[in-house]
């Protein structure tokens, strides 16, 4: 169960007091009685901040397991380290759709989960003192994909080479530092700014958060985890582009990310907002169609193997079917929902759809 997404228990009648729309230069909300500030408070306090805190705890556990491994590198401490790594990687999937504000400025997502990792660059960095992880050139040699390669792709080297163990711990510390910077920014005042910016304009928090949410879904969940490896954007499938290639649990990461996006829609106010507006599509509530499509994606995902590299190599038709189900939801979210909420798309997706 996703620990940080909590049901928005307030009944819809609670969303009654019209706010002062502090952040909007175009007040004209579609439903003046729907309290957008209450929804933003829920997003901040029950989704974004808990996600960062949970992630911080999971990376702290990973760091502790790493210290134990480095002190006594053997199969037992390695197994514990691998288990802690998977827990942290899953935690990041729950955080990833909600990287806003300082996280965007720091390029948190790119530095935490750019794959495939650059194996040659990792080897060069291990042999180099004072690696600067802020440099864009080092993006593909850090984060979870680099840690995964060290743990599963070069296990014997990690067990026997202190320099590789040191690099592993430097990458873990990097994740801790990035998350701490973002969390501190939220807790030092950005939370209040975010909630108060509750207007109905392109720069308001709801517009920006929903755009970032859909961008994540389209670019990183749909295309990155499924479409690119399945060959949607290339002449042939690319099995080496899957997430968690060496660990072999791409499916688990995908399903965790899918659950985070699904619960954000169904349990944190967007569904309630659409229902309050009585938005229908072909005679049925749009919110129910979106919820049903999330369920279809979950069913399609259940048919996959744990390793998407193996899936692409042995039954890519199944991966293509999963992509098709993901694409159907893009239309519902990016076209129908945004139109109903009077939110303009603020990004350009380069994949041609």
Image (tube, rainbow, N blue to C red):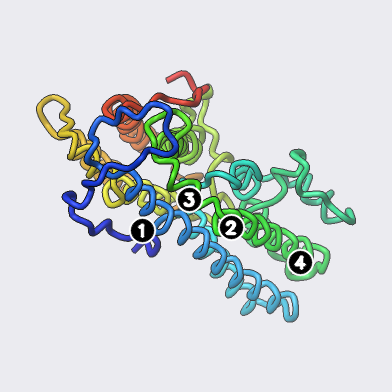
Residue beneath label 2, please? Answer: 188
- The residue to which callout 4 is attached is 165
| Mark toward the start of the polypeptide (4 vs 1) | 1
> Which residue corresponds to the image point at 36% horizontal and 58% vertical from the top-left?
5
Which of the two labelled residues, at mark 4 and mark 2, occupies the earlier sequence position?
A: 4
Q: Residue furthest top?
A: 352
Earlier along the polypeptide chain: callout 3 or callout 4?
Answer: 4
Sequence-earlier tag: 2 or 1: 1
Q: Nearer the viewer, residue 259 or 30?
A: 30
Q: Which corner quadrant of the image does residue 293 belong to?
A: top left
In the rendered image, the vertical position of residue 351 relative to residue 259, given as above or below: above
Q: CA distance from mark 3 to mark 2?
A: 35 Å
Quarter placement of the C terminus: top left
- SS at mark 2 in the image: helix
Give the structural element (helix, strand or loop) at label 4. helix
**Which residue is labeled 1 in the image?**
5
Do residues under tags 3 and 2 come within 8 Å of each other at their CB atoms? no
| Rendered position, 120 above or below 235 | below
């Amino acid at each position: 169960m996703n620990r940080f997404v909590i049901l928005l228990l307030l009944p819809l009648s609670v969303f009654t007091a019209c706010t002062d729309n502090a952040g909007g230069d175009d007040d004209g909300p579609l439903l003046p009685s729907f309290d957008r500030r209450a929804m933003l408070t829920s997003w901040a306090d029950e989704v974004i901040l808990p996600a960062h805190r949970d992630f911080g705890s999971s990376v702290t556990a990973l760091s502790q397991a790493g210290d134990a491994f480095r002190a006594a590198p053997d199969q037992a401490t390695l197994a514990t380290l691998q288990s802690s790594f998977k827990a942290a990687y899953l935690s990041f999937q729950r955080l990833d759709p909600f990287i806003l504000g300082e996280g965007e400025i720091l390029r948190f997502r790119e530095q935490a989960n750019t794959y495939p990792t650059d194996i040659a660059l990792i080897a060069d960095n291990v042999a180099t003192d004072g690696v600067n992880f802020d440099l864009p050139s080092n993006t593909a040699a850090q984060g979870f994909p680099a840690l995964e390669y060290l743990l599963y792709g070069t296990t014997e080297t990690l067990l026997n080479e202190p320099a590789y163990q040191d690099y592993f711990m430097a990458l873990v510390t990097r994740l801790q530092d990035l998350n701490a910077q973002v969390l501190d920014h939220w807790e030092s005042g950005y939370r209040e700014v975010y909630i108060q910016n509750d207007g109905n304009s392109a720069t308001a928090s709801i517009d920006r958060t929903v755009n970032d949410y859909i961008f994540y879904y389209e670019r990183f969940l749909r295309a990155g985890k499924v479409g690119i490896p399945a060959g949607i954007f290339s002449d042939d499938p690319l099995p080496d582009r899957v997430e968690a290639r060496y660990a072999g649990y791409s499916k688990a990461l995908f399903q965790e990310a899918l659950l985070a996006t699904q619960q954000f829609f169904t349990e944190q106010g967007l569904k309630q907002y659409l229902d309050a507006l009585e938005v229908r599509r072909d005679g049925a509530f749009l919110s129910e169609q979106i919820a049903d499509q999330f369920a279809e994606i979950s069913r399609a995902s259940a048919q996959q193997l744990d390793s998407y590299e193996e899936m692409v190599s042995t039954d890519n038709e199944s991966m293509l079917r999963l992509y098709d189900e993901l694409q159907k939801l893009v239309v519902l979210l990016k076209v129908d929902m945004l139109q109903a909420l009077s939110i303009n798309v603020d990004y350009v997706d380069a994949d041609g759809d």
